[in-house]
Image: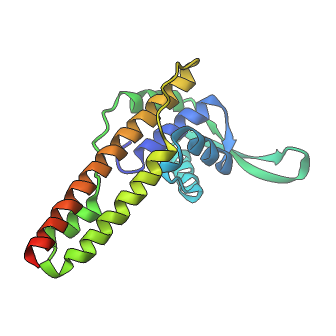
Amino acid sequence: MRGASAPLRGALLGLLLERPGHGGELANRLIARLGETWRIDPNDVYRLLEQLEAEGLASSREEHRRGNQRRTRLVYHPTDQTPRALTCWMETLMPREPVRLGLQAKLAVAREQDLRRLSVALREHERECLALAQLVCPSDGQVRSWAALCMDCTRDAVYGMLQAEIDWTARTRQRIDEYAARAS
């Protein structure tokens, strides 16, 4: 499992092994585990579940909705191959995700007349990262379960990446603003 969707695919395998679920429920479980900063789109979850099923790592079947025998929904289940696929994913080192790609590309080709637009884009990116960091503040308390420990470590990692993003953005914006002041 490689590519941008590999982390979500691997996480979906883990959730399927915990218990089966329909696409919307699995998307909600991913959001609850990974947090709002991941911006998980339920449509992407459905697409990934279809891919997992095509690869034999998940199976689906229509099941009646609870309390409604007339309506059904597609519920995804693990297959015999799911545990091994999850193990392989857990053992695979993930490549570092590209960060600030859009801003880095803009900086790489920016002209002096783009200076103000860059400063605005950086300020907006900084605000967005600050807002996201508030959502994932790591706890400083003692964790009481394995699931709580894993979630706390995940929040801590995201918080650290966001803090690095905030620091880089602020420094870059400051350097651009200082250049603009000298050039005036």
Percent position of residue 118, x then y: 25, 71
Q: Quadrant of the C terminus?
A: bottom left
In the image as oriented, which residue stretches furthest toward the bottom? Answer: 113
Compared to residue 82, the image places residue 98 above or below, namely: below
In the rendered image, residue 70, in percent from the top left (x then y), is placed at 90, 54
157 or 43: nearer the viewer: 157
| Screen quadrant of the N terminus | top left
Left or right? Give the position of 50 relative to 3: right
Residue at horizontal 40 percent and vertical 59 percent from the top: 127
Q: How many marks?
A: 0
- Within the image, what quadrant is residue 17 found in? top right
Task: Examine the rendered structure and indicate whether residue 142 appears above or below residue 97.
Answer: above
- Vertical comparison of 112 with 83: above or below: below
**Of the pair 132 and 86, the residue shown nearer to us:** 132
- Pinpoint residue 159: horizontal percent, then vertical percent: 40, 40
- Residue 6 position, x and y percent, is 41, 44
- Residue 141 or residue 13, whichever sits in front: 141
> 184 left or right of 156?
left
In the image, is 156 to the left or to the right of 177? Answer: right
Residue at horizontal 33%, vertical 64%?
Answer: 123
Q: Residue at x 48, y 49 (%)?
A: 37
